[in-house]
Amino acid sequence: MISIQKMVIPTIKKSLLAITLAGILARLMLESTMAQNCGCASGFCCSKYGYCGTSLIYCGTGCQSGPCSSSANNGVVVSNIVTQAFFDGIISQAASSCAGKSFYTRDAFLQALESYTSFGTTGTTDDSKREIAAFFAHVTHGTDHFCYIEEINGSSMNYCDATNTQYPCVAGKGYYGRGPLQLAWNYNYGAAGKSIGFDGLQYPETVANDVVISFKASLWFWMNYCHSIITSGKGFGATIQAINGANECNGKNTPQMQNRVKYYKDYCTQFNVSPGDQLNC
């Protein structure tokens, strides 16, 4: 006869094992939600939790960047919204002497976009339009209508975080703002370069010399730091906080903040979509 004790002990062990596994899974899920910066290598997807991989778990629903599965998209075709007329409407306002006038092109943006297929294709159609409007509002403000490729007096700025040992600064290299969203800091250049496929620490100037990489660097930053903010309905103001909150939010430089909001509202009007709430930061 099998004793009751012998029958109960295996059951208890199984229950404890199940509880332990559930705890580990919960911890992993929590850690996943805390991950913000993928820095994935070329060909890998950045999952909705911020991790790199190639399976549907990474490239499916919520995929932030990389060769995301079309099943994660809502059917919006970004090129139908970012038309040549829309792009020209921005860059045409830059003076003919601007370096960016002969550098930035819509074709380069669309080519870069192939690596970030969740941009402008997440949520509802209105969500997509707001995200596209938000991105180009920041681009317009940061580059003055695609006039600037590099930050004004950027070479005199120190954007080296010496405490970051993962992406250490290279002597003689400047990590000041470059590209449509003015990518800055060594840790962003390092992570963006790793994801895109160039040495961002050794050759940060690539972002100012290769127009496709320039757009890719800005889209990389957007997908890692702003995409989930705007698509989750937190409002345009939260993207200002993510991009330059330390200098513009909470009354620090209200005119600059309002300039971004002005462009955002203008582009939302052009796209025939409400800008939503929470526009300021």
Image (tube, rainbow, N blue to C red):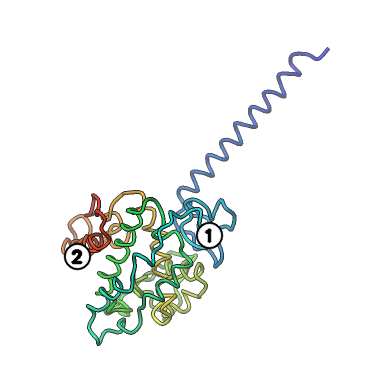
Q: Is residue 73 above or below residue 89?
A: above
Query: Quick one: SS at disc 2?
Result: helix
User: What quarter of the picture does the C terminus occupy?
Assistant: bottom left
Query: Quick one: SS at disc 1?
Result: strand
- The residue positioned 38% from the left and 71% from the top of the image is 160
- Residue wearing tag 2: 259
Amino acid type, label 1: Cys
Instruction: Locate residue 37 relative to residue 93 in the image: left or right.
Output: right
- Residue wearing tag 1: 45
- How far across and down, in percent of the image, does residue 170 sit? 46, 76
- The residue positioned 46% from the left and 57% from the top of the image is 64
- How far across and down, in percent of the image, does residue 239 sit? 30, 57
| Crowd rating for badge 2 (residues with CA inside 10 Å; few <14, some 14–19, many 20+) | some
Instruction: Locate residue 246 relative to residue 58 in the image: left or right.
Output: left
Outermost residue, left direction?
255
Instruction: Locate residue 279 relative to residue 73 in the image: left or right.
Output: left
Q: CA distance from mark 1 to mark 2?
A: 34 Å
Q: Is residue 204 above or below residue 115?
A: below
Q: Earlier in the sequence, mark 1 or mark 2?
A: 1
Q: Are marks 1 and 2 in contact (CB under 8 Å)?
A: no
